[in-house]
Image (tube, rainbow, N blue to C red):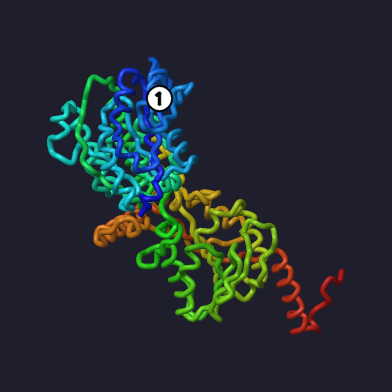
Amino acid sequence: MADVTAKARVLIFIVAYNAEKTIEKVLKRIPDSLQQYDTEILIIDDSSKDSTFEAAEAARIKGEIPYPITVLRNPVNQMYGGNQKIGYHYAIERGFDFVALVHGDGQYAPERLPELLMPLVNGEADAVFGSRMMTLTGALEGGMPMYKYVGNRILTAFQNQVLGSSLSEFHTGYRIYSTKALAKLPFHLNTNDFHFDTEIIIQFIVAGLKIKELPIPTYYGDEKCHVNGLKYAWDVVKASATARLQTYCLMYRRNFDVQPAETDSWRHRPKLTFESSQTKALELVAPNSRVLTFGGDSAIDLIPHLEKKGCRVTVLDRQSPIRNASSNVEYFQHDPNSDSQLPIDVSDHDYILMLDVVEQAHSPEAFLERLMEACKFNQRAKLIVSSANVGFFITRSMHLFGQFNYSKKGILDLRHTRLFTFESLERVVAESGFEVERVEGIPAPYPLVIRNEKFANFLLNLNNSLIKLRRTMFAYQIIVVAKPLPTLPSLLKDAVDHSKQRLASAPEAREPVGTAR
């Protein structure tokens, strides 16, 4: 809770465009009771076509307003969202505790500022919105046109459904923010257009910040609306749907990447409770075997389960070795993108796991060739490689509409530097000196994104059926099982060893190796 006696710093930020006739009236409506705080007013004229700047400056000079006033004018119109960005940056940079957004046309009652400010001062919220929709007909009684009322209701219902929120109104322009909360958000990446208000709400929701709504009266005067309603509605739908699709790893926008680190489970979500590349690899590894696995979330999740099968595990990871590892697990630091040879002897390992690793290598070919070199005298080892299938039908479908959206996880993971189809993954493994023995398709991890267990299992079964029909299109992941082919050094060694054994078994019938006739 903020200490009121310390006079919380409050900035009343008035966005103004062609508000020459209303700006002074709005200033005079700001309550004197806000003097209990360290209150200032910032007016930013967004390159109006009238004399808004001069009118605001004249009101400042009169000295009738009991608060310090700063009047600025953008030399180039920044649009509604862009103007807000400048004001919020001003508030953060100058150390204000709260910033209240007020419109220069007087549509939102400045008289309600003290009431809206209280939940922030009391530490009850990170943002407070004045809502015109908390009463059933209040907005209509205040002069809101019917088409705007219906549109507001429909859009808000859609956004609540898509974003999992419960706001009464997404489209109010009367807001007070905590600058500490704003400083956590990349609001500078949001649109400059009118749906900036929607995008910043999405950021608050995804970031887990608290929003409180309070009822405000609706007033529609003779002010001119500068919003293209249909375009605005479409922009709102797109922004909300994009944010939702980002939770399914189908889209990615940096401005919506604000989930708190402690709740951000994108990078580490085990897939061991349903059919996945992890469960398939665990099934393929025989008990009591020696396993080499390259680090990564998928591999790390498997380690306890491999230990339960009596396996001894060697882990190569980019990170520093874990010192408190089990006696059955050895950790070594190794970057698959480096040119250095593997820091261990691979000759005594039975399985080599590369789960969701090959697509992160800058050069999978070079990586696999170094691995093959390390396996040159160990033809019994099984290589198990898994990778996302870029030919998955959802990725293909999105590409048809010009979308190729990287995300924090999934097929188009931001960390992926190479993308594979069934054919290209088989080829890169085979051309690196391995004989491909088995190739399978893995269904999408529906249980990670669908809470209804029965429905998720139904989709898994359906996906498996479709994989049998056409795995190149319906498999979410590819798993390849291969074994090292004999290398030239190993073939030469075998020839020499075999010749010596043959000579030793019947020396009287053999001439020395290399003897010319």
Q: Tell me where residue 216 sits by quadrant.
A: top left
189, 497: nearer the viewer = 189
For mark 1, give the secondary structure: helix
Q: Residue at x 79, y 81 (%)?
A: 509
**Residue, disc 1:** 60
| Quadrant (top left, top right, bottom left, bottom right) of the N terminus | bottom left
Q: Residue at x 37, y 64 (%)?
A: 275
In the displayed orientation, state which residue is furthest to the right.
516
- Decide: is 449 above or below 87: below
- Decide: is 346 above or below 216: below
Question: Count of labels shown?
Answer: 1
| Quadrant (top left, top right, bottom left, bottom right) of the C terminus | bottom right
301, 220: nearer the viewer = 220
232, 490: nearer the viewer = 232
Q: Tell me where residue 266 sits by quadrant.
A: bottom left
Residue 448 seen in the figure: yes
- Decide: is 342 above or below 313: above
The x and y percentages for residue 502 are 74, 79
Residue 405 seen in the figure: no
179 to the left or right of 230: right
The x and y percentages for residue 321 are 60, 70
User: What amino acid does circle 1 point to?
Assistant: Arg
The x and y percentages for residue 79 are 40, 26
248 to the left or right of 164: right
Q: Residue at x 61, y 55 (%)?
A: 431
331 to the left or right of 262: right
Q: Residues within 10 Å of mark 1 (few under 14, many from 20)?
A: many
147, 423: nearer the viewer = 147
- Decide: is 375 above or below 67: below
The x and y percentages for residue 136 are 13, 38
